[in-house]
Image (spheres, rainbow, N blue to C red):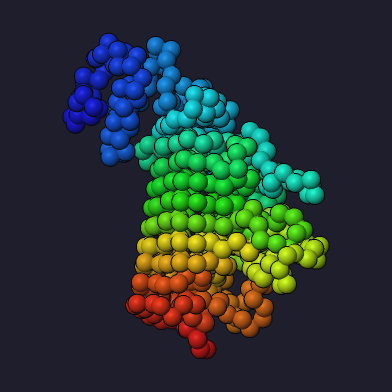
Amino acid sequence: MPSAGIIGFSVKQANSASATRRQLLQMSAFGVSMIRSDVAFARQNPDDETGLAGAVVSEGRRQGMRGSVVTPEEFGAKGDAKKTSGGWRGTDDVAAINAAIEWLHGIGGGELIISNPHLLASAHGKTALHLPNQQEPQAYIDYAIGLYPDIKLSFVGRGAFVAADGVRDIHTPLVCLAMVSPDRFVANVGIQGGMIRGFFVGVAAFTGRAVEWRIDDVTFADCGLAFVARALEQCVFRDLSIAHCGAGVICGGFWVDDADDYNEDGGYADKCLFSNIRHISDWDITKQGRELDEWFDQHVYQSTRNSELKPGRSAHSVVKSTHYSGVCGYGVRLMTRYGRPSNANFFDLFSHANSPRAAIKIDLGQANACGTVYGENVGFVDGQNRRLRVGYEAVDPYLGPGKRLPCVVSGVSSIMAISLQHIVADRAADTDHIMNISDAWTSLGGK
């Protein structure tokens, strides 16, 4: 039996050494280090069924102690979600998970260890879609779990995930994890491992700027929007699988007010890393994808309100310099609304498939670059079967009849390598700085 923990307990020893563990837990820093070590062991051994990862936490719970590492079960969660013919069923763990996170927030931050399947079937509260502004009527959306600064959610094991109770679309929207802190800058939020499935939005930061967030080794499945943020600074998105979602990572594009001036509150992304992202869309932009595009425009971008703009300080319109082109189908979409560019972001090992739209699209930016990008079955409404080519048998409403996808990657200054298969688009990218391009079975630039 393998050993784990900072003092080398075997599983057998762990079950018989409660006195030693009790002493360690009374020394909070040492106890927390031990828990983290056991959790690391569980991550490296996802099939282990001994329960070693939770042994120290369980002992602490028996002694009535809580530290900066807790589990939902300590706060009453059942973790008994199961798939049925009618969707996911089980105990609604929304209240318990929020209680755990609010406990951690109250002591200054910490880590929530999730090792079971949890059903999130209700709303814990509402998050605003816009910043406080006396000019604007506020709009809200329901969320299940609230996020605060210095909180990390760690999913341990293959059976650890959170799931909605049914189809959460524009008619019954529910955000899984929403930033609810009133701070304008919310730093050091982490989500590692696990799966988020069936929500209208997986993770959302509508009202503040996400700073130094790390989303690592997470699967988003069957969501409308996997991740949405007003602004990102020095965030890391690594080892993500985004499957059967309307869109991947969407940042910016927020209406603020009627002043036609530069305004960072409209959104941007700076100095972020997107590494090893696997995006498979499988959404139809003429059906449910069009509903998603229209929802985002109506509630967030609000393009129809351009007619309300008052002249700004410059001779030309800042707000009208970019145009809304939807959100559905994009792997990463960095949008500009009030002239603020997105700068110094890097993309590498980026895979994009079964989508009618671009892998990466940046409206306005400087010094954004790509390492390796792979695209397959792009430019089709039905990418999985390579049917209904955009610009031929199908129309992208934001491009118009007879217009193909302009390019697979847009808004970056350079690409190290791009490999394309079964692509219908005008160009691979809107930059000439591509070191290597491979385009097999691809229609680029011609009919």
Residue 72 shows in the view: yes
Q: Is residue 323 left or right of residue 72?
A: right
Of 243 and 67, the residue lying toward us? 67
Vertical side of 425 occupied by 98: above or below = above
Residue 291 shows in the view: no
Name the residue rendered at 40%, 13% in the picture. Answer: 62
**Residue 162, x across and y down, in percent:** 50, 39
Name the residue rendered at 61%, 81% in the picture. Answer: 403
**Residue 256, x across and y down, in percent:** 71, 54
**Residue 95, x across and y down, in percent:** 58, 28
Name the residue rendered at 41%, 27% in the picture. Answer: 69
Vertical side of 91 occupied by 208: above or below = below
Name the residue rendered at 52%, 82% in the picture. Answer: 426
Of 112 and 196, the residue lying toward us? 112
Q: How many marks?
A: 0
Q: Quadrant of residue 304?
A: bottom right
**Residue lying furthest front in this view?**
313
Q: Quadrant of residue 28?
A: top left
**Residue 400, x across and y down, in percent:** 67, 78
